Every structure is written in structure tokens, then in C-alpha cells.
Image: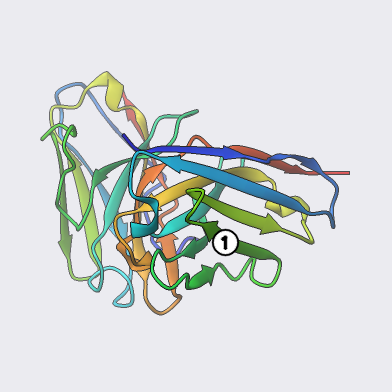
Amino acid sequence: EVNLLESGGGLVQPGGSLRLSCAASGFTFNNYAMNWVRQAPGKGLEWVSSISGADYSTYYADSVKGRFTISRDNSKNTVFLLMSSLRAEDTAVYLCAKSFGLGVSTSIESWGQGTLVNVSS
Amino acid sequence: QPVLTQPPSASGTPGQRVTISCSGTGSNIGVNGVIWYQQIPGTAPRVLIYSNNQRPSGVPDRFSGSESGTSASLAISGLQSEDEADYFCSVWHFGLRGVVFGGGTRLTVL
């Protein structure tokens, strides 16, 4: 059974930084692309970033490009999201998600429960 | 504004059949398979349909998906109270090089 456990969320001031982690289990981690998606309170899903399972190619939404960095450690079955220059509009639950396959274009198959990031002074 | 367009709400009575539409463009729907997710408030989304019309194991056959041109649809037959949830369509957008979602449809079972 796929299990994705996010951590690292919390309250941070505007302009601050935060690193999210997602520990994966129940599948061969390095065979799958991984993603971060966020959901602001009462809102829909917004894709944030993806990283392939093969060549570690990375992709970002325009709203976070240049501020967020996705990475993965296949030896620890973990994917990370380093967020900097945070803004109030980044406030959301951040969900870690596993793709259907190795490439990012295979889209999202499984989801974690999410971790809340609150950007406020 | 979401790249994919969904109606914000839908409703039906128990036993009824409802459909939810998802409209895109030739750069997304029609190029890659559409995924449909169900999200019960307070929980993580789950896949109902992938590759336009494929159901993962464990998803009841009351749920079906279709795609035509630049639009996709999710149909739910024999509506049940536990189907009350938010439904999102999604697809990989090759032009934007990212995943795009619809704005979501809140389904109410009357």
C-alpha cells in the first residue's frame, strides 16, 4: 500500500523559508515521479512542482518558479520542497503525490494527507 | 483561473445519474489522458478515473469517464449519499510543462 507522509509545515513570516519533506513507502520510490500540489483553505487544487524518477528533471508552476525548489533522495525514499521568499498567498495545505510512472507527464496517482503552511506576520 | 473548466456545482437525488464536464483545449485534453479525482472534505483526493476512462481497482463501476475532442466527462450512476464530495479533473499540459486541474465541482446528493 502506498503511503506518503508529509512533514515540515508550520507558521512562517512573509519572506521566510520552510522545507517540506515527504517520506514514501509501499512502492519502489526511484521508479516514480513525485509531485507537490497545494490547496488553499476552501479552494481547489493547484499544482506546485514535479520531479521525474529518472533524470531528476524538475518542473514548476509559474507562481513559485525561482522561489521553490523540489528535490529527492532516492536512498531515503523522500522528496523535498524548499520554499523561500514566502508570501501570504502561499498559505495552503501542501500535498505530496506519487505519479503513475517514471515520467512527470503520467500524472498523479496517489496522495498524502498534506501539511499546512501558514504564511503570516 | 483554472486551465480546465468545470461547473462549480452539481446535484442529484439518490439513484439518479449525474455527469460532470471538464473543458480544456487541444494543448491538454485530447493530448494526454484525463484523470478524475474525488475529494471528500478534510481528506486527500483519490483517483476515480485515469487515462480518460479507466477505473482503478476498488472504484465502483458506477463511475465512468469519457473524452471527446477537448472535453471530458465523469458520469456517476445510481447516485449514493456517500458520493457527496468535490470532483476535480486533471491532465498533464505539455505546453505549460505541468499538471493542470479544473476548479472542482461540488456534488450534492439531495
State the residue at coordinates (22%, 71%): B30
Q: Is residue B83 above or below residue B34?
A: above
The answer to whether residue A32 is visible is no
Looking at numbered disc 1 in the image, what kind of residue is underneath it?
A: Ser
Q: Is residue A9 left or right of residue B37?
A: right
Q: How is the image coloured?
A: rainbow
Quick one: which residue is furthest to the front in this view? A75
In percent of width and height, residue B71 lies at: 24, 63
Tell me, yes or no, if residue A14 can be seen here. yes
Q: Nearer the viewer, residue A38 or B19?
A: A38
User: Would you call the spot at circle 1 few (<14 residues within 10 Å), some (14-19), or many (20 or more)?
Assistant: many
Most extreme residue toward the right, as rendered?
A121
The subunit carrying tag 1 is A
Question: Is the residue A18 above or below the residue B67 in the image?
Answer: above
Q: Quadrant of the C terminus of chain A?
A: top right
Query: Which residue is denoted by mark 1 in the rendering?
Result: A71
Residue A94, quarter of the rendered image: top right
Image point 47% across, 70% down: which residue?
A56
In the drawing, does residue B100 fall left or right of residue A87? left
